[in-house]
Image: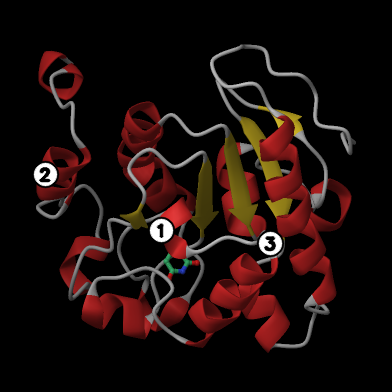
């Protein structure tokens, strides 16, 4: 669509996204959680969906999972200013249920346009919803986590959602090691060259 092609800044995209009514989540949301961070980030963190706190304040990972995420980033020598963080859907699903397939599909153009504008080197999928959204709808997290996959113009690297650490379903050491691998791989990548050299720990 010509109008879509004419969007050439994240600010414009965000303004349009905040008016989105393309799925029924628009009826129950308080705010659209567009995402935030470095508009030229090399690392793009893709989560699941906003929860209650994110819905209230309009920022991604604003709650306890966000505190875990900040610690994981810090362990890899990164801050939120180094990365861009967003969700697979931008509006909170009622009662924090997983987003439905149709909601993910309705939200997908916003994500695609964010990726097109930011042009990250690596998309880190935080949890199964993100993995199934952009890698493979049938993927199992245990099988893909910590491995590198070639996406359209960027690498895809699945790891656990920080909320899994809070639930104690995974030890923090695993996503911590994954984010360190991501930071290490990024430092070896050659910007502007595609396809990139495969990161050393490629699966
Ligand atoms: N996706 C998540 O998983 N959490 C957020 O806070 C926002 C997007």
Q: Quadrant of ligand 1?
A: bottom left
Residue 94 image offset from top left, x and y in percent: 35, 77
Residue to which mark 1 is pinned = 81
* Mark 3 crowdedness (10 Å alpha carbons): few <14, some 14-19, many ≥20: some
Residue 154 image offset from top left, x and y in percent: 58, 27
Of labels 3 and 2, the one closer to you: 3
Which residue sits at x=47%, y=53%?
A: 82
Of labels 1 and 2, the one closer to you: 1
Whether residues under marks 3 and 2 lie with C-beta atoms below 8 angstroms apart, the answer is: no
Q: In what quadrant of the picture does the N terminus appear?
A: top left
Q: Is residue 85 visible?
A: no
Q: Which secondary structure, mark 3?
A: loop
Whether residues under marks 3 and 1 lie with C-beta atoms below 8 angstroms apart, the answer is: no
Residue 16 shows which numbered tag?
A: 2
Q: Earlier in the sequence, mark 3 or mark 2?
A: 2
Rounded to the nearest angstrom, the CA distance separating label 3 from label 2 is 33 Å
Q: Earlier in the sequence, mark 1 or mark 2?
A: 2
Q: In what quadrant of the picture does the C terminus appear?
A: top right
Which residue sits at x=87%, y=49%?
A: 143
Compared across the picture, whether 102 is left or right of 140 comes to left
């Amino acid at each position: 669509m010509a109008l879509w092609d004419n969007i050439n800044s994240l600010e414009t995209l965000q303004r349009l996204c905040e008016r989105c009514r393309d799925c029924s989540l628009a009826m129950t949301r308080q705010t659209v959680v567009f995402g935030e961070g470095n508009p030229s980030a090399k690392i793009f963190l893709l989560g699941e969906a906003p929860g209650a706190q994110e819905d209230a304040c309009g920022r991604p990972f604003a709650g306890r999972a966000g505190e875990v995420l900040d610690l994981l980033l810090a362990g890899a020598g990164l801050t939120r200013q180094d990365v861009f963080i967003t969700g697979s859907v931008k509006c909170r699903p009622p009662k924090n249920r997983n987003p439905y397939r149709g909601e993910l599909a309705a939200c997908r153009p916003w994500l695609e346009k964010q990726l097109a504008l930011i042009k990250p080197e690596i998309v880190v999928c935080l949890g199964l919803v993100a993995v199934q959204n952009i890698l493979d709808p049938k993927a199992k997290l245990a099988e893909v986590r910590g491995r590198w996959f070639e996406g359209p113009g960027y690498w895809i690297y699945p790891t656990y959602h920080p909320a899994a650490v809070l639930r104690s379903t995974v030890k923090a050491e695993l996503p911590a090691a994954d984010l360190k691998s991501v930071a290490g791989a990024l430092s070896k990548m050659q910007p502007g060259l595609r396809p990139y050299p495969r990161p050393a720990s490629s699966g």
